[in-house]
Every structure is written in C-alpha cells, then in structure tokens.
Image (cartoon, rainbow, N blue to C red):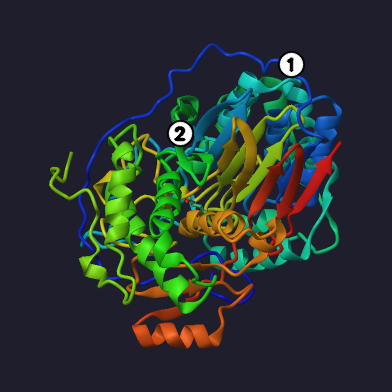
Amino acid sequence: MILKTEPRIRSLALGAIMTSALITAGFVETAPAYAKTADQSQVLTSSAVAVADKYAADTAEQIFKQGGNAVDAAVAIAFTLAVTYPEAGNIGGGGFMTLYVDHRPYFLDYRERAPMSATRNMYLDDKGEVIKDMSLYGHRAVGVPGTVEGMWEAQKRFGKLKWKQVLAPAIKYAQDGFEVDDQLISRRDNASKDFAGKTNFDLYFGSMKAGQVFKQPDLAKTLQRISDKGAKGFYEGETADLIARSMEGHGLITRQDLKSYKAVWRQPITASWNGYRVITAPPPSSGGVGLVQLLKMKADLKDKFTDVPLDSAQYIHLVAEIEKRVFADRAQYLGDPDFYKVPVAQLINDDYILKRAQEVNPNEPSDTKSVQPGLGTSMPEKAETTHFSVVDKWGNAVSNTYTINGYFGSGVVAEGTGIVLNDEMDDFASKPGVPNMFGVVGSDANAIAPKKRPLSSMTPTILTKDDKVAMVIGTPGGSRIFTSIFQVLSNVYDFNMPLAEAVGATRFHHQLLPPNTIFQEPYHQLDPEVIKQLEAKGYKFTMQGFNGDIQAIRIDGDTPEPMSDPRGRGVSRVIK
Ligand code: DON
C-alpha cells in the first residue's frame, strides 16, 4: 500500500548487505506449576486499559465487573479485537504477552511458526531472486497462527474467570455485529487494492460500510468452537479442517502444523534503567534487545544530550547515531532462539553498550558501511499489529502486542471460518540482505526453516519500580515499534512530559538502511528548519506513511493513568 491515506508498509529499496550469524542462549522458561493468582488486597484505586478501540474497552469493563483480573481482561480484549479491529486484531496471527503477576515477570511467545514444509528458499525464483509479494499476499505468506494457543495458555495459567466468560463479548460482537469506524474503512479500501485478484478478501470485507453494523457469522461459529473446546476448538476438529482445506492447492499449512503448534513461556529480558526495571520482549523479538540498547546508549551519552532540545537537529542526529548501531546488531544476531543461540546477554551487557555508545560521532553521521555489528562476525556463518495495555486493581499488568503483519495480513480468509490469516512469513529474511516490508534486512539467524518463528520487532514492555508496576507500554509499527517506545519513554522520564504529551509528540525513525535516511510520520512532521540543518549534514528525509498506535498506562502512586495514541482510534479507560 502506498502513502495515500494510511498504508501497509511497503518494501524499501535497499542495497544488499552481507551478513552472517552469531549465536547464544535459548531462554525457555522452566515454568513453575500452574497456579491461579493469589487473592491479594487491592493496591490500586482502579483497573485501567489502553486499547485499540472502544469495543475492546467495553469488553475490559465487563470482565473487570465480573471479577476478572488483568489476564482475563487481556484475553477477552484480544478476542474482541479479532472481531472489531479485523485489520490487526486477530486469531489468525500471533504475538507476545509480557505479564507482571503477583510481583513476578513472565513472557509468553505465541508467535507464528513456519509450516513444516517451509524451505529456506521458498520465496526465491530459479535465479535466486526474491519473488515480489509472495511472502506478503495469499496463502503462501501465512505462518501457523499462535494467538488462540497463547490466549489459552495465559488464561489457563493466570485467569480467574471461566474461559467461556472471556470469549463471550467477542462472540456477541461477531454474531450481533458492531458499528464500523471510518478508519477501518479506509484501511479496508487500501488493503482491498493490494489483494485484488489475489485473495478472497473482498468476499468477506467488501460489504463493510462506515457507520453501519457489520456481522461475521462464520467468525462467531469459530469463536463458539473455541469457547466450547478451548485451544482445540482452533487447532483440531472443524476449525483446523477448514483452515487446512482452504490451504489445499494454495498454501503449506496442514492439520499436523496446526495440531503441533505450541506457545512458549520464555524468560523476559529485564534491565535496570533510570531507577526502573524494564521488563520486555526476548527473541524471537528483536524489540527488547533494541529497546534496552536504545535506552542505555542514550543514558551513556548523557553529557552529549545535555541541553540538547527534543527534536532539534542535534537530538535527531544523536538518536540516529544510536539507532544505526542497534539496527546493525539486529540484522546480524537476532532470530528464533529455538534455532539460533541469540547472544542476548552480550547484546544488553552494560560494558558492551557503553562501548557502542562511545562509537557515536557527535558531529557527523557515521559512514553507514563503517557501522558493523558490535560483537564481531567471526562465528561460522552457518551454524498490522495492535497493542493493548492492562492493569488491574491488584497491581497485575499485561502488555500485549499481536499481529497479522500488514493490515488484514495475507488477505486470505480461511473459508467458512471468518479467520483473517497473517502474512508473517515476510518477517523472515527471504534472502540475506534483502529488505522485508519494513525495510529491515536479516541474516542466517532469521532464515526460513520448518517450525521456526520469524524475527519480530514487537516489544510489549512493563516498567516496575520497587516491585510495583510503573508503566505498561507498546505499539504496532514493525521495525518502528521499539524506536517509538524508546521515544515515548524518553519523553516521559528524561523530558518529564505528561503522558498525553509524550505519546502525542512527534516521532521519527532511522534503521541504518537506507543510509542516513530519517523517516518522518504523517501525524506530526519535523520543523523544516531542523530538516534543512540535517540535510546539510548528509541526512535524507522520507515519509513512512505510518503513525504507530501507542497504548500506555502510567502508574504514579496508586492511580493508573491510561493513554491511547491520538493517531489511532484507541480508547483508554479507568475502571472502578
Ligand atoms: O512482528 C513484527 O515485527 C511485525 N510483523 C509487526 C507488524 C506491525 O507492527 C504492523 N503494523 N504496522
């Protein structure tokens, strides 16, 4: 989708860079026995949510009124958004959930996996070139969905309500319908152009009209099966049969792929920053490593940032210098930890980050080619998303980002199910050095393999102070996700902005490639005078046609303050 109203993010033409892989730690959590959360006394004045639409906020309210906790609310929100926010909310995709329950951090990886018959070169032609759009549109773009298994795992482990209770609001919205928002229609119109002649998208969504009620009877039946049978209502039986049948002759996902899907509890990344404990996403996300590197490098460069005003030419230059180094590491070392030992501990080590910070050139943009992955390359070579934040009055928190990748994913709706299937396979490196939809490149660490999870940038994050939740934050935006979260956190904690201002403030983005290119967002543009000064240094500016959609909750004392990004149709609500 090209700029116009609000695009899916298009590939950006980049020069190829050669990369190789380096490896360490797997990070699967040895899960303690499942236990429902201990009944605690109320520690906050209220519960709160920041979610992508008003229906999800209503669902959360209903769940809290029934006595549910943050995990119940999160699971109910996820199913609701699969109905009312179909461009990104989903049961046909996957994601990550960062939790803080009874003062302990957890991370659930329910990212999609490559089908068992996927192969490393499945998107290459016989000359070894990437076949345009094959990993983006249609059946072959689809990874094995993880959302339902993820929600099942989280609710089973920590929820207080019955499974049926958390499904009920979504089933009602699918059966009785919901009123369609203008923003949804404009995204549908853009997607429809991309999918025309390639998928059955219009059969399901072509009739949707702004301001009118839209019902999804097939989806209601699918959700009912999930409500009746738990995760098996998706991964086995009728739903699995329908998904597999819709793939026959077109795509790779089989009944066996669905039956063998598993979500994984992993150790979240944790780091100390600015008096807070940052709890964030480990691989297969690159987001947690990226966020910690950004936050700490900026802190290490405190002297250089002193008296540098926000969004001044010098500020943007320094942040871009930091981002260059973060994205060099991302391309080289990050991938699915079940396949490659990602060197997480080394990448977020304080001495290593300080060394990288010291490489920042305070005056001029460092030559792109000179910015290499920081741990060396001596190891052998082989070896549209939505976020919501929830806190409950007992002090538990859920930060959840899940996705079908581009808006409406692959554009394929599994016949008879109403399920919009993802195009997450595009997050793999189809070929080393060739950029994906977000313009980011990858190496062997992110090559396609059966059952492997594609590298993500999703960064659901929680900050705690003295073991109490202080911030819950996340956003969609592909590779812009962790640079956006970094900017909001820096606005709040370094610039002392009120949360609304911090979330609404201008954001920009740089990712090493294309060289010295700063992406601006349509919502707020940078000062033309600042742009002129940076162009004189050699930077180029380009619009990214994408805004992000931060959903954040800040807790200072015992009162949660939720905030939804003014760029989206999100709703934040305090619930007594
Ligand atoms: O996992 C990832 O990083 C991407 N698939 C996320 C996609 C996304 O944020 C789409 N939003 N614009």
1 or 2: tag closer to the N-terminus: 1
Please report the residue visible at 50 percent of the width from the left and 70 percent of the height from the top: 307
- Secondary structure under tag 1 reads loop
Q: Which residue is mark 2?
A: 254
Q: Find residue 51 and report its horizontal and vertical position in percent.
A: 71, 48
| Amino acid type at image mark 2 | Thr
User: Are there few (<14), some (14-19), or many (20+) residues within 10 Å of tag 1?
Assistant: few
- Residue 119 locus on image (x, y percent): 29, 43
Q: Is residue 314 left or right of residue 389?
A: left
Position of 170 relative to 481 (above/below): above
Residue 475 percent coordinates (x, y): 59, 53
Q: Nearer the viewer, residue 538 or 465?
A: 465
Q: Residue furthest top?
A: 33
In the shown orientation, is residue 68 left or right of residue 529? right
Closer to the eye: label 1 or 2: 1
The quadrant in which the N terminus is found is bottom right
Query: In the displayed structure, would residue 544 be above or below residue 111?
Result: below
Q: Quick check: can you spot residue 60?
A: yes
Q: Which residue matches tag 1?
A: 39
Q: Secondary structure at mark 2?
A: loop
Q: Which of the two residues, 235 or 466, is positioned nearer the viewer here?
A: 466
> Going 74% across and 48% down the picture, which residue do you hit?
562
Q: Give the spatial CA distance, label 1 vs label 2.
A: 42 Å
* Residue at 40%, 39% in the rendered image: 283
Q: Nearer the viewer, residue 8 or 39?
A: 39
- The answer to whether the residues at label 1 and label 2 have Cβ atoms under 8 Å apart is no
